[in-house]
Amino acid sequence: MILSCQNICKSFNDKNILQNISFHIEDQEKAAIVGINGAGKTTLLRIIVGELQADEGNVVLSKNKSLGYLAQNQSVDSNHTIYEELLTVKQDLIDLEQRIRQMELEMKSVSGIALEKLMDSYALLTHQFESGGGYSYRSELAGVLKGLGFLEEEFGKPVCTLSGGQKTRVALGKLLLLSPDLIILDEPTNHLDMSSIAWLETYLLNYKGAVIIVSHDRYFLDRIANKVIEIDQTKATSFPGNYSSYAVKKEELRAARLKAYMNQQQEIKHQEEVIAKLKSFNREKSIKRAESREKMLNKIERLEKPTETRTDMHISLEPRIVSGNDVLYVENLSKSFGPLQLFQDIGFELKRGEHVAIIGDNGTGKTTILKIINGLLEPDTGLIRMGTNVHIGYYDQEHHVLHTEKTLFDEISDDYPTLNNTEIRNTLAAFLFTGDDVFKRIGDISGGERGRVSLAKLMLSESNFLILDEPTNHLDIASKEILEDALNSYEGTVLYVSHDRYFINRTASRILDLSGRALTNYLGNYDYYLEKKQETLAASLSETASLSSGNATYREQETAAKLNWKEQKEKQARQRKKENELKRTEERIEILESRDAEIDALMARPDVCTNVAKLQELSKEKEGIQEELESLMERWEILESELS
């Protein structure tokens, strides 16, 4: 065990944030701390690293173990260049290297015993230098910088000229190079693009020390975590496994607790009715029996009703009218800013009901594509054509669709004048704005709150084509799941840009990858995209050495281009049909197996096993179930093999 937290308690202004929080972290364990915004996750991290004092409890770090901490917005103030700043982490190796070079010079001017002593010291220091990574630390440093998204030409930039996000990446790079026994990371993916997040995942998976992560990136947590510590209503509960495993187990526990609560409430109500009935008899014995039951009822430890899941926001997205089948046609689209060309001659189509994600590294032009489609930017070249009855609802990550001088109430009422005061307040309340909150100025609220106002306007718009730019930014996990459910039930068309891979996985039916100034189409969700990318990489590695990477890329794009729209849609339809049949088959198998078990229980009952007619009836039903199960199992195997 490397870390132990025992009965940690913390309050602010008489409000309990953490109560009796206890857990431990083993060597090499990768743990995630999850909870809604304001649950106390960052507070707990600050207590662990000693930045905050707990009101009660102890934090124990094992003897001779080191700890490193990356805060959410950890800034590095330095006149060093980026490369020099990371180099400070390896100062001991730099000093050792200088001492070794000095010894090499001294060897030229000494002899005899002095030389022997010098050679012995030289051998010892050289061994220390080698075992400490002295021959590889510069390449390791460059690898970390590149992995975190810094280009080689940026290594010489002064740290003091960097943005807040870039400085946080520098701080993360320094922490990784320090290689402490326990790394603690608070939202480490906030300032990273997809490539950098994937690199960090691989780095942490192979990291020999322990890791504690607070993050809203569920895909990241799925890849990294083997333990999840949930903070909910000031208490902590530990779950083995990754985020998806935790989510399933949490819902199972909540369902079991709700069932126990409902059963107890039913029993309490029953006892109260019996007590009332006994008292109504108005006889001495009946009254005593009622009093006895009352005492027993008062001794019952009352269970608390479990909190409802994902009830914070209420989003309902419904198109006002149905668009034509052809929603959007883009052809030969190009855009440059000065000498920087973002993309050239790209094209794609959207059909009604499709949910399409545009992905790619930062700076490739994803948001620019959305702005061009929405008429906010002019393309250099290209054609954009909207289909019949297409009405756009636009969610801008910078929230330019909002008016900073207006109040929240006026922002809604001015755009939707037919709504009365109660309807406006109810809409804002669905997005957690109640009371006097509705009279706050847009310019005075946080980025996360502006995002909720934008979502409220999007819901009211009743559009049939949603264009969303980073819609999950500033949302906690519960709110993201609410938005995912709303989009998945939305019958209109969606085109969005997002770095949230879990969100993409749940909501996208197609992915457009923007890289190398071109778009590549992938007919599936994020997992499918990764699988196809890996297949492409494996294929390119097996090509002969004489085949240049440029030709390989050309052939891949040429092959993708040959798949016309109709073929892709037919393939997608066949896939969905098989997936739906597989799901129905599994559900029917589950129902039949459940009924089969019920029949076995019935046949074992004394009142049934002596009833010949009833036994025959149950036996016949059981025989029919077995025959149907055998047929379903065969069909399930066929579908499973076809979909695998």
Image (cartoon, helix red, strand yellow):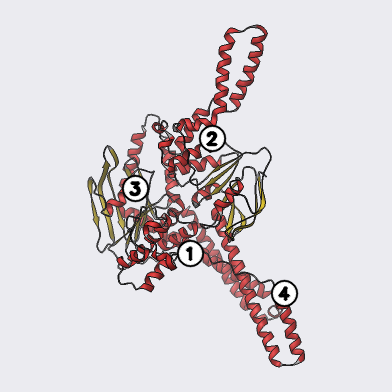
Q: State yes or no: discs 1 and 3 in contact (Cβ < 8 Å).
A: no
Within 10 Å of disc 3 (Cα), the crowding (few <14, some 14-19, many 20+) is: many
Task: State the residue position of label 4.
Answer: 299
Mark nearest the camera among 2 and 3 is 2
Residue 185, horizontal then vertical, whole percent: 54, 45
Task: State the residue position of label 1.
Answer: 312
Q: Answer with mark 2 or mark 3, whichever residue precedes in sequence.
A: 2
Q: Residue at x 57, y 39 (%)?
A: 207
Q: Answer with mark 1 or mark 4, whichever residue precedes in sequence.
A: 4
Q: Tell me the SS state at disc 1.
A: loop
Task: State the residue position of label 2.
Answer: 177
Q: State yes or no: discs 2 and 1 in contact (Cβ < 8 Å).
A: no
Q: Amino acid at mark 2?
A: Leu
| Rendered image: mark on residue 366 | 3
Within 10 Å of disc 1 (Cα), the crowding (few <14, some 14-19, many 20+) is: some
Q: Answer with mark 1 or mark 3, whichever residue precedes in sequence.
A: 1
